[in-house]
Image (spheres, rainbow, N blue to C red):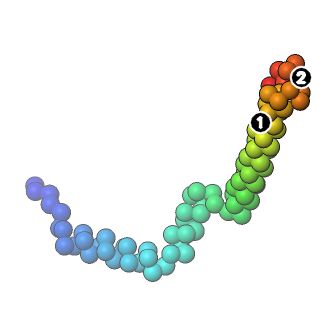
Amino acid sequence: MIKSLNIPRTDQIVFNTVINTLQDTSELHKHLTDKLGVDQGYRQRRADIRKNIKDLEVQLDTVETSLADLETDVRTNKVDTAIFERVK
């Protein structure tokens, strides 16, 4: 028994399936949303995480600036070195 694949028929089936999927994307969107768990709760968590990252970046920038200012004050003898070592 010889098994073979009818290429033209297979191409037509695949082509029709792709066209049908692209014509009605709502079903594809619903399927992906269900499978990936993308809903309003997910979007809110993602927004909260991005806001948290932004706030932490601002805090890090503030700390780095403060340390640089403190180091400048130590080098210009405006602040005692012992204080700098405790903070550092």
Dot 2 alpha-carbon crowd within 10 angstroms: few under 14, some 14 to 19, many 20 or more = few
Quarter holding residue 71: top right
Per the image, the residue denoted by label 1 is 68
* Residue 70 x, y percent position in the rendering: 83, 33
Image: 34 above or below 76: below
Left or right: where does residue 72 sit relative to residue 28?
right
Quarter holding residue 37: bottom right
* Residue 27 x, y percent position in the rendering: 53, 72
Q: Residue at x 86, y 26 (%)?
A: 77
* Relative depth, front residue between 55 and 43: 55
Report whether residue 64 is seen. Answer: yes
Q: Tag 2: residue type?
A: Asp
Left or right: where does residue 5 sit relative to residue 38?
left
Q: Residue at x 78, y 41 (%)?
A: 65
Left or right: where does residue 14 sit relative to residue 61?
left
Quarter holding residue 19: bottom left
* Residue 43 x, y percent position in the rendering: 69, 60
* Relative depth, front residue between 7 and 61: 61
Report whether residue 63 is seen. Answer: no
Per the image, the residue denoted by label 2 is 80
Image: 31 above or below 64: below
Q: Tag 1: residue type?
A: Ala
Q: Residue at x 10, y 56 (%)?
A: 2
